[in-house]
Image (cartoon, rainbow, N blue to C red):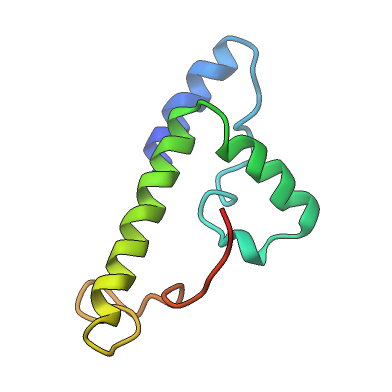
Amino acid sequence: MDRVRRGENKTLRAAGDDRLTGTRYDWLRHPAAMEPKDRQEFAALRNSNLKTARAWALKEAAMAWRCTATSTSGRRGNISAGGMDGRCGVGYSR
């Protein structure tokens, strides 16, 4: 995810576009934990036609699938795949 953002940011900055500058941690944060203003700005980036936005959407889909797959066994999160995922079971609108 971050490799995609860094590569795309380098390309965009060469063209004079600073949209991704300073957004590293926005792509890692849970949108529900953002301030309303930050959430609106992130939504604009997320809904853009950037490679980073597509990578974020794939990451979120994989996390949702992982949470769904583990919730059928009655557990919340997946302990065996690198730690408890606290985002399982937390709903938010995209």
* Side of 17 relative to 40 (left or right): left
The extreme top residue here reads 15
Position of the N terminus, as image quadrant, is top left
* Side of 72 relative to 23 (left or right): left
Q: Position of residue 81 (x, y in %)?
A: 22, 72
* Side of 20 relative to 53 (left or right): right
Vertical arrangement, residue 5 with respect to residue 75, above or below: above
| Residue 91 or residue 55, whichever sits in front | 91
The extreme bottom residue here reads 74
Residue pictured at 35% horizontal, 62% vertical: 63
Vertical arrangement, residue 40 with respect to residue 78, above or below: above
Vertical arrangement, residue 93 with respect to residue 73, above or below: above
Number of numbered callouts drawn = 0
Residue pictured at 39% horizontal, 40% vertical: 55
Q: Position of residue 86 (x, y in %)?
A: 44, 78
* Side of 12 relative to 39 (left or right): left
- Quadrant for residue 62, please give it: bottom left
Q: Position of residue 28 (x, y in %)?
A: 51, 55
Residue pictured at 56% horizontal, 40% vertical: 46
Q: Position of residue 20 (x, y in %)?
A: 60, 32
Residue pictured at 50% horizontal, 22% vertical: 10
